[in-house]
Structures are given as structure tokens and as C-alpha cells.
Amino acid sequence: MIIASSIVLIVTSLLMVVLVLMHKGKGGGLSDMFGGGINSSLGGSSVVERNLDRLTVGVGVIWFASIVVLGLLFKHKGVG
């Protein structure tokens, strides 16, 4: 169970990094340096942005839940 939770945590962590970097930047920050300042046809769509927000929140909830599960499993096993 610990290994499965660890794998879920690693996968959701990587997904969170990718999803956060895909978000449209609000100002001239780090996202503009990596091409975030370029307006594309998909980037301006409010439907795409809302779906990206929902996906990011969903992955974040799974990420948080896997951290809680791992904490409970380690506490139950007496590790830490």
C-alpha cells in the first residue's frame, strides 16, 4: 500500500508541475520567459482555461490525499 501511494504521489507531483506551467501567466514573470507571453488560439479560450483549472484542482486533491494516506500509513507502521 505504501508503494502504491508513493507512486500516486510521484505521478501527481509531476502532473502538478506540468499543469501549473501550462497556466496562462498574469504578468511578465517566469511564464513569459518560457513562451507564456505568446498568445495562441487555445490559450485565450475560457473553456480551455476553466478545464485546465478543474484538472489542476482535481490533481491537487489527489496529491494532497496521497500525502495524508502516506502519513497515516507511516504513522501506523511506526516509521517516523
Image (cartoon, rainbow, N blue to C red):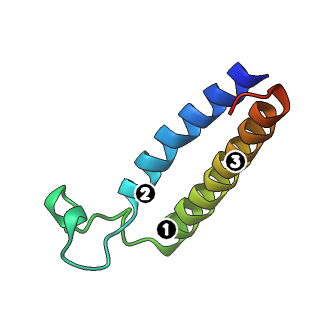
Residue drawn at (58%, 62%) of the image: 51
Find the distance from the CA under tag 1 to the CA under tag 2.
Answer: 12 Å
Q: Identify the residue shown where x is 35% and y is 68%.
A: 24
Specify which label sits upstream in the sequence, 3 or 2.
2
Task: Reply above or below: 9 against 49.
Answer: above
Mark toward the viewer: 1 or 2: 2
Residue type at mark 2: give it: Val
Q: Quadrant of the N terminus?
A: top right
Locate residue 38, reporting x and y percent: 19, 65
Q: Amino acid at mark 1?
A: Glu
Identify the residue position indicated by label 2 in the image: 20
Label 1 environment density (alpha carbons within 10 Å; few <14, some 14–19, many ≥20)? some
Question: Percent from the top left, x then y, of residue 42?
Answer: 38, 62
Q: How many marks?
A: 3
Residue assigned mark 1: 49
Q: Amino acid at mark 3?
A: Ile
